[in-house]
Image: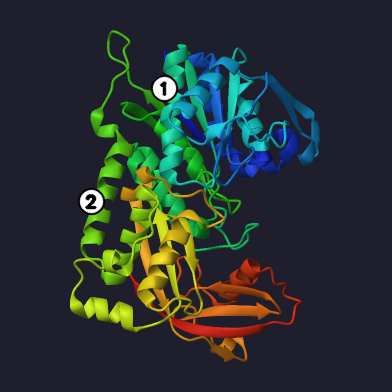
Amino acid sequence: MSIVASYMVPHPPLIVPEVGRGSEGQVRKTIESYKRVAEDIAKMKPETIIISSPHATMYSDYFHISPGKSAKGSFADFSASKVKFAEEYDTELVSRIELLARREDFPAGTMGERKRELDHGTMVPLYFIRQKYSDFKIIRIGLSGLSLTDHYKLGTIIAEAVRDTGRRAVYVASGDLSHKLQEYGPYGFAKEGPEYDERIMDVASRGAFGEMLDFEETFCEKAAECGHRSFVMMAGALDGLSVDIETLSHEDVTGVGYGLCIFHVKRDDAGNVVEDESRRFLEIHLKKELKRLADMRSGSDAYVRLARRSLETYIMNGKTISTAEGMEGFSDEEKAELMSNQAGAFVSIHEHGMLRGCIGTILPTEDSVAEEIIHNAISASTRDPRFEPIIPSEIPYLEVNVDVLGKPEPIKSKAELDVKRYGVIVTCGMKRGLLLPDLDGVDTVDQQVSIAMRKGGIKESDRYSLERFEVIRHI
């Protein structure tokens, strides 16, 4: 069998009457839509319900699948301890997903469980489903800090495991939309909030899942959404399949967006799944990304070309290139510029819209900026402690930038900073934190200084000094 249907649902505990205690009436449309979802799942009669939840165990670089044979939970944290759940896991399907992930060297599995109890992102959907249907097991999967493409990829692995085990399954993508839709809401308002809700509901209503991969990380962060990665994983589970779509509702009266949609996998008269090659969205996205990056590389200046040549040579061959090797084919003017100057330099690497490495020097440590770039490119790609070393298969998808730093100058206060023009260095004794200027998602000086302090382990109460510097950014 296969995944026969998928559902995009929110998870506010408020809509559970024992929790809402009357206040759930303000989102009546959401509740009625949830009942429609539950009725639809009952008609599908799945053996297994796969639930991805933003509130399950989450890691920055790993997808956690809940282990064991079963788990319990309740709404005790929401003053409704009598509403309880005891769910059985589909251990065979979990094992198959783990096996496929290992074969593809994909970071997903059952290691690292932190809390066995069911989370509310899982229990809210189950509350409504169990009122209509009960003959099923579940799989619970957390999200991660990895890229949207990785979330989509896991969805394809899940779908393959479902087919391999012959399960009849449905996928429930649990996730609220923006949390910043109204000034009176618990998280306030941001213009990106309603923009996100309008955009995601449009994409879902058209089944244009490939467009989910085009949402920028900074946009999603400003919108304070919680379900986007869950929806992308669901999209991956439907990769290459034709679907019928039913958009049920969208509400934002609490300041948080709640959207519900149903996606039925189409079948022909013989009962076979209808495939659609035009809906291989990950493959399409990656081809488009490779072209974009190739176009970008063709227009890169000497600084970026040198950084890329350095990191690619080291990743592929474990060799540090000389300046002569690194600048082979460069013009005499480019060589002179790179060899005659000394400066601190940062090399930043992104992959699929996510930071993949960033290492640099505030002041020059080498005889030339060329050598500075060669060594920092290697460090950024293989020695950034926040990330695993980059491997050869990632090279085509890397976006490389080089920032050459001007000399830092002391300043008396934040008033002398400009988040777009100046980077900042915060120093307290031996502690030092630096942040480059003009970064996505860093819109204010207070944000910039706060992040630099956090990077340096400096507290607001510490006595610290500030320096600013300008950069020349090479892309």
**Which quadrant of the structure image shows residue 304?**
bottom left
**Colouring:** rainbow
Identified by mark 1, the residue type is Glu
Badge 2 element: helix
The answer, for residue 191, to whether it is visible in the render is no
For the N terminus, the quadrant is top left
Q: Nearer the viewer, residue 149 or 232?
A: 149
The answer, for residue 186, to whether it is visible in the render is yes
Residue on which the image places disc 2: 291
Q: Nearer the viewer, residue 27 or 306?
A: 306
Badge 1 element: helix
Image position, residue 230 (x, y; %): 50, 39
Crowd class of label 1 (few under 14; some 14 to 19; many from 20; radius 10 Å): some
First in residue order: circle 2 vs circle 1? 1
Image position, residue 27 (x, y; %): 60, 42
**Which quadrant of the structure image shows residue 65?**
top right
Above or below, 9 relative to 6: below
Q: Nearer the viewer, residue 353 or 56?
A: 353
* CA gap, disc 2 and disc 1: 28 Å
Image position, residue 124 (x, y; %): 64, 33
Image position, residue 475 (x, y; %): 32, 68
Residue at horizontal 46 percent and vertical 20 percent from the top: 161
Identified by mark 2, the residue type is Lys
Circle on res. 18: none
Residue on which the image places disc 1: 160
